[in-house]
Amino acid sequence: MKTRIRIRTIITMLSFASTVMIKAQDPLFNSYPSAQAVIFLDFDGHTVNGTSWNYNGPIVCGTSGLDNSQITEIFNRVAEDYRPFNINVTTDSTKYLAAPANKRMRVILTVSSSWYGSAGGVAFVNSFTWGDNNPCFVFSQLLNYNVKFISEATSHETGHTLGLYHQASYDTSCVKLSDYHAGQGSGEIGWAPIMGVGYYQNFTLWNNGPNTYGCTSYQNDLDIITSATNGIGFRPDDHANTFSDASVASFYNNQFNLSGVVERNTDQDVFTFALPASGRFQLDAVPYNVGTGNAGSDLDMQVTLYNASQTFLNVFNPGTLLSSVIDTTLNAGVYYVKVEGKGNMYAPAYASLGSYSLQAQATPATTLALNKLELRGNLNGDKHELSWIIDATEAVTNQRLEISTDGRNFQSLAQISNNDRSYIYRPYNAPTAEYRLNVTFSNGHQYYSNVVAINGDLPGPKLTATIVHSNKVTVTSPGNYNYLVTDINGKILNKGKLASGINTINIVNMAAGMYLIHFSDDSRQWTDKIIRQ
């Protein structure tokens, strides 16, 4: 039986564009030209004949009504959703026609929807492998020509053709809340499943969660897309995950630029570089995006820095951003950087996948004999204690301690006397923070220390026991907090709100193993481990 699924148009549309734009030719793009399998984004109109859609004669589809800049962004967003897979997203019809008949899909993006009705798009489930040129549709005018909405609908409808049903949402009593999981959170890391409704969240990903057929009917999107039925699979790994086989980053004019793809949730890309001289090292690790706030990104990046002996130095993963930044002082020598995808307070790590770039800048300490500028930090009760070593030939004329609570933007915390080498304080709104020292010397040169992170432990929810022997977990809480229980792969098992006092959380289908419980309020987030025996 052929199952047809549409994505509802659940957008309040105040007005429609009244003019259909006419273009000479759509731009030609390919995301992975060497792949056999093809997703063809057809923007320039098409007449559909001889398919399962033609129960009432030919379907004449007009163009998408989009200009080239809009087409480019839609292509880039959809291509990034399918980046981990061995499949070519293209706007070139010749690529579609040359692909095997049972490994291709035409997605018609069109203003013509009256033949079907009110929907953002429609597709036959599993039709990618039928081999009979059945397309799927995305209705651009009904989506108000909104590039974000059209992109989400395109990836969603194509997902149906690859065998995916809707990711639904249920409450803790297994009562369905919606056929379309709308996700959670806000801002750059606000998350939703692609196969739910991703119109209103930035970070939209494939998911492993209950589909519309029941709260225990879990749909593993990645496994289905890469199944033998579809014959696609993941892309080959582009960078090794070991120190011995690390990809080499070479400096040119004190810079290097690299790129890669995190193809699987087990993928770790390791790079090595030789810092030619002691000084400041900056690295911007940025997931692919189509605009500010990492719009359209599918990868929440974590970067870890190691020295030549492969000893851990620091991890960089700002909680409210998808990108990461290293800004520290290093001695000359060999270092390693490990890149991987992670989850956050809203999104599981399950499908934090996609492409990224690394841009590094080295600023040698050429005019100052700076032997050491090292910052250290630790937590003492509810106080943050910081101390540092400065070993230089020039005198210190100014030193300022700087703080970051988002992992990217630093601001002044305290002006320190030139002779002091420590600072202790009790943070008010930043129980978890990163610090660096900004030092100016008598020759006028300015340097930054390494960055240190201090994770606070202000009063909050706590497990009464981390090892449990049943499906019940007990938490003591000083107030109202959110909680989220996941397995080690990021699959959500339970979520809700804690009240002040003792809370008992029931977690169904909790087999022996390790689980994570995430706590959060309006300004903080932290995670504890649960061991089920």
Image (spheres, helix red, strand yellow):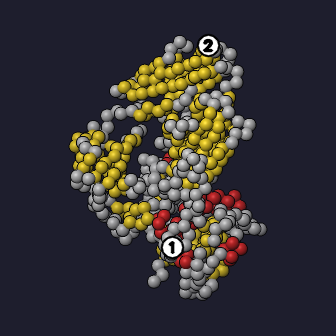
Judged left or right of residue 514, residue 374 is right
Q: Residue type at mark 1: give it.
A: Ala
Instruction: Specify the label residue 295 is tagged with.
Output: none
Q: How many C-alpha atoms fall within 10 Å of the one at disc 2: few (<14), some, or many (≥20)?
A: some
Judged left or right of residue 469, residue 425 is right
Total numbered labels placed on residues in the image: 2
Q: How many C-alpha atoms fall within 10 Å of the one at disc 1: few (<14), some, or many (≥20)?
A: few
Q: Residue type at mark 2: give it.
A: Ala
Q: Nearer the viewer, residue 49 or 367?
A: 367
- The part of the image, by quadrant, that contains residue 100 is bottom right
* SS class, disc 1: loop
Q: Is residue 468 above or below residue 264?
A: above
Q: Are marks 2 and 1 in contact (CB under 8 Å)?
A: no
* Point 55% across, 13% down: residue: 418
Q: Residue furthest right?
A: 24
Q: Return the x and y of residue 507 as percentages of the image width and height.
A: 28, 56
Q: CA distance from mark 2 to mark 1?
A: 67 Å
Q: Is residue 305 visible?
A: yes
Q: Is residue 53 above or below residue 314?
A: below
Residue that mark 1 sits on? 228
* Point 45% across, 70% down: residue: 165
* Point 50% across, 21% down: residue: 388
Judged left or right of residue 252, residue 178 is left
* SS class, disc 2: loop
Q: Nearer the viewer, residue 265 or 522?
A: 265
Q: Earlier in the sequence, mark 2 or mark 1?
A: 1
Instruction: Specify the label residue 395 is tagged with.
Output: 2
